[in-house]
Image (tube, rainbow, N blue to C red):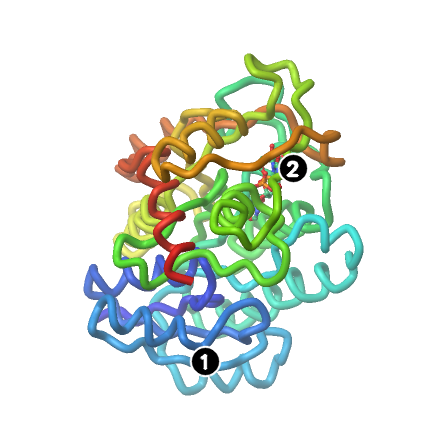
Amino acid sequence: MKKILVTGGLGFIGSHVVVELQNKGFNVVIIDNLSNSRIEVLENITSITGIKPDFYQIDLRAKVDVQNFFQDNSIDGIIHFAAFKAVGESVEKPLEYYENNIGSLVYLLQEISDRKISNFIFSSSCTVYGQAEDLPITERAQIKQPESPYGNTKKIGEEIIKDACGAYDINAIALRYFNPIGAHDSVKIGELPLGVPQNLIPYITQTAIGIREQLSVFGDDYPTADGTAIRDYIHVVDLAKAHVLALQRLLDKKNNQNFEVFNVGTGKGSSVMEVINTFERVSGKPLNYKIVERRQGDITAAYADTTSANEILGWKSEKTLEEALLSSWKWQQKQ
Ligand code: WQD
């Protein structure tokens, strides 16, 4: 049974990937420093799969703890989520983002190269494309100077990994997520935004349940059909399955290069108003919102060309926007 380390495995996407890995028979060990996640997620994962993952509360910036972990655990592959991920916060605290997101990555890669661990999956983001010239966005699209230090840590992270793969015997895949939304069908794991949600879907569900007074729609003067910005909203369970297929590709040594990149999205763009209307329809809850100024740094439109993931990974998103929004709503009702 292959032993897979999932860093940030108690987080939103990480926890869903742990469940899918266990479903596929992998032995999963989690490292998480609980800075942006809750320990009860460990029990919730266990209650879904019946298997309790090993858990180490380690901060990946603590180099000695990372070394000790790898002395005690023989790892066959790593899926690396652990990072700070709030776009707005990264603008206020850039050095914390570079120290944490880049520092942790370098320590991890040093251990991996020292111990000849060669399978590494990196959580990247479509934010590296900025506003792409052409839509849908392919992996060959130009990488732009991201709008935020958070986005820059993903761009730099990919570059560091690529150099490490070239210099050491590491094989890696970076998955560039579009907009992850939704929650597990069991309603036992989902998104747990701490504080005021930055992202659209948790803000919508918190408004619908009465935690937030009103949703602000950031701009309706974009050059789109209804004036609101377009994104590619992908169900987190579909996204999680892409990680298992990417890991299996490396374990089976099917990768063509030592560093590969895949966009992971539905391939379909939805505007903010379309999301609001769809949410109202699936939840039966009218949403209180108002149109306000654009948010600084937002782009007009982004949605994925998923040909590479479809044809090379053998992965395709299955769940609809309706299913994803309904799962988010059920999750919110349970909080
Ligand atoms: C989606 C759309 C907003 C909130 C970011 C990161 C990306 C990933 C996902 C981490 C935009 C609009 C939002 C609100 C709104 N994060 N919106 N009112 O900005 O596309 O992507 O989060 O990995 O890397 O870049 O996601 O959910 O913040 O915004 O109108 O209260 O909803 O303007 O058009 P975004 P988002």
Residue 98 sits in quarter: bottom right
**Is the CB of mark 2 within 8 Å of ligand 1?**
yes
Q: Earlier in the sequence, mark 1 or mark 2?
A: 1
Residue 125 sits in quarter: top right
Helix, strand or loop under label 2: strand
Residue 288 drawn at (x, y percent): 56, 37
Disc 1: which residue: 70
**Residue found 66% across the figure and 19% down from its top:** 222
| Label at residue 292 | none
Inspect the image, locate mark 1, and give the three-letter code of the amino acid beneath it. Answer: Phe
**Residue found 58% across the figure and 77% down from its top:** 59
Residue 94 drawn at (x, y percent): 77, 56
**Residue found 57% across the figure and 45% down from its top:** 199
Q: Is residue 75 above or below residue 157?
A: below
Considering depth in this image, is 289 or 128 the residue closer to the camera?
A: 289
Disc 2: which residue: 216
Label 2: how many residues lie within 10 Å, few (<14), some (14-19) or many (20+)? some
Residue 277 sits in quarter: top left
Q: Nearer the viewer, mark 1 or mark 2?
A: 2
Residue 129 left/right relative to 39: right
Inspect the image, locate mark 2, and give the three-letter code of the amino acid beneath it. Answer: Ser
Badge count: 2
Instruction: State the separation of the CA atoms marked 1 and 2.
Output: 46 Å
Considering depth in this image, is 202 or 87 the residue closer to the camera?
A: 202
**Residue found 37% across the figure and 39% down from its top:** 283
Helix, strand or loop under label 1: helix
